[in-house]
Image (cartoon, rainbow, N blue to C red):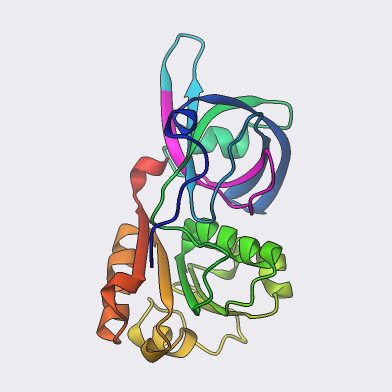
Amino acid sequence: MERAAVPGRLGDRLRWRTAEVTGRRVESATAVTLTLDVPGWPGHLAGQHVDVRLTAEDGYSTQRSYSIASAPDGRNLDLTVQRTPGGEVSPYLVDELVPGDRLELRGPVGGWFIWRQQQTEPIVLVAGGSGLVPLMCMIRAREAAGSRAPFRLLYAARTPSDLLYRSELRKGAPGLDTTYLYSREAPEDSPRPPGRISPEDLARGGWPPDFEPTCYVCGPTGFVEKTAAYLVLLGHAPERVRTERFGHSRG
């Protein structure tokens, strides 16, 4: 699959912009979705992220990267942020930021871990925790574009209360199949007991390798490395397995 052009000129994407928070929606006890109005936003592709910078009154500044959750929509962006215990940025974004507040961001960033509406092959999405965010952007972009590319999502969470976008995923969309995998606690009606993701999970919930799907895997580093290895073990071509991982620096 050829690489896609990234919206906007490089210099424009590297410029810091001031964004205003226009909406705030609670996703779970530890995560919120922030809707931002970003004047001059050059647009984005599904799967990209932005850098967010916060600056204190004494001049100290720090920044973190967050995936874009929303389908491309003019100058508006949704960022879903999960609080990281002991983090510098995420606790402020989750607990303190309200509509009317402003922050700085730049982007979009990334040109490999993306889905484009021109893609027609089957898609396997594998999310670990908040790794669902860029994959949800792909799901929303697919629906907004009216694409018929078949999507299968495997979403691994610790417990049912940790699920993001639960009502939207429960409603579903034509051509999207979702499988939930719980590692610590599963609901009573779950067909699968709690446990870590396995090759059997991927074989049941994903597409067979001979369908030549593109696989997108996002989550904590250990989850991503293990899942990518399982996909190759099952026969998926390594060049069709795209990964995005995050660590404690996302706090």
Q: Is residue 9 above or below residue 139?
A: above
Measuring 48% from the left and 50% from the top, which residue is drawn there? 48
The question of residue 72 being in magenta is answered with yes
Q: Quadrant of the N terminus?
A: bottom left
| Residue 155 position in % (x across, y down) | 51, 71
Q: Is residue 49 left or right of residue 30?
A: left
**Residues drawn in magenta:** 62-83
| Residue 227 position in % (x across, y down) | 33, 73
The outermost residue toward the top is 58
Measuring 73% from the left and 26% from the top, which residue is drawn there? 100
| Residue 66 position in % (x across, y down) | 49, 44
Q: Is residue 153 above or below residue 29?
A: below
Q: Quadrant of residue 232?
A: bottom left
Q: How many marks?
A: 0
The question of residue 70 being in magenta is answered with yes
Viewer-closest of 147 and 138: 147
Q: Quadrant of the C terminus?
A: top left
Viewer-closest of 143 and 4: 4
Viewer-closest of 113 and 91: 113
| Residue 75 position in % (x across, y down) | 68, 38
Measuring 25% from the left and 84% from the top, which residue is drawn there? 233
Q: Is residue 181 left or right of residue 29?
A: left
Measuring 46% from the left and 66% from the top, which residue is drawn there? 127
Viewer-closest of 10 and 189: 10
Q: Quadrant of residue 20?
A: top right
Q: Is residue 67 above or below residue 21?
A: below
